[in-house]
Amino acid sequence: MTLLPDFYRVENILSSSKNAYVAAVHLNPAHPIFVGHFPDNPVAPGVCMMQILKELVEEVEQKSLFLAHASNVKFTALINPNENAVLQFDFEISHDEEGQIKVKNTTTFGETIALKLTNTYRIV
């Protein structure tokens, strides 16, 4: 279950190696969140992009996760769902000695990098 129903759909999640994944995600430009963020100039909220990543990792790991730490979070381009509805999430998953899940991610549309971050999740 996603936090924001109908905000996006996952077209696929492919594994490019043991711990590396590529997910194609299609945003729904008609979702009500874009009415408020922002009228006549829709932009995908950064926190929603971070939530999508968390949900992708939950799908891969088959575990419920809680964001414990975010670092090096860089939003580098605005994502307008009317112009760039298909996003690519490239992420690597590792596990630390405390049982937490560390994820390095780059989100793009076309050749444009929209988001780079490193998150650590606690299993709940």
Image (spheres, rainbow, N blue to C red):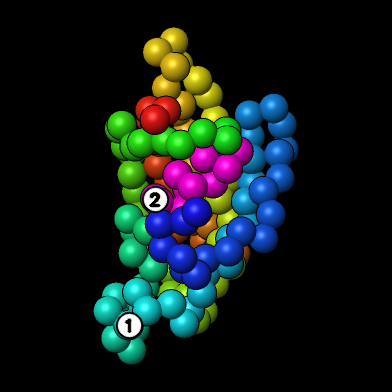
Q: Which residue is mark 2?
A: 50
- The foreground one among 100 and 70 is 100
Q: CA distance from mark 2 to mark 1?
A: 20 Å
Where residue 33 appears, as percent x and y from the top left, is: 35, 74
Residue 76 shows in this picture: no
* Amino acid under disc 2: Met
Q: Secondary structure at mark 1?
A: helix
Q: Secondary structure at mark 2?
A: helix
Residue 82 shows in this picture: yes
**As drawn, is 96 to the left or to the right of 71?**
right
**As drawn, is 52 to the left or to the right of 17?**
left
Which residue in the rendered view is the most extreme toward the bottom? 40
Residue at the spot 48% in from the left edge and 79% down from the top edge: 29
Other-residue count near label 2 (Cα within 10 Å), few / some / many at <14 / 14–19 / ≥20:
many
Rendering quarter of residue 88 = bottom right
Q: Earlier in the sequence, mark 2 or mark 1?
A: 1
Is the magenta region chiefly helix, strand or loop? helix
Q: Which residue is mark 1?
A: 35
Any magenta on residue 52? yes
Residue at the spot 52% in from the left edge and 61% down from the top edge: 112
Q: Magenta stretch: give its range.
A: 50-60
* Amino acid under disc 1: Val
Residue at the spot 39% in from the left edge and 50% down from the top edge: 50
Where residue 66 appears, as percent x and y from the top left, is: 36, 36
Rendering quarter of residue 109 = bottom right
Q: Are marks 2 and 1 in contact (CB under 8 Å)?
A: no
Task: Please state, as top left, top right, bottom left or bottom right, where the C terminus lies in the image.
Answer: top left
**As drawn, is 33 to the left or to the right of 113?**
left
Other-residue count near label 1 (Cα within 10 Å), few / some / many at <14 / 14–19 / ≥20:
some
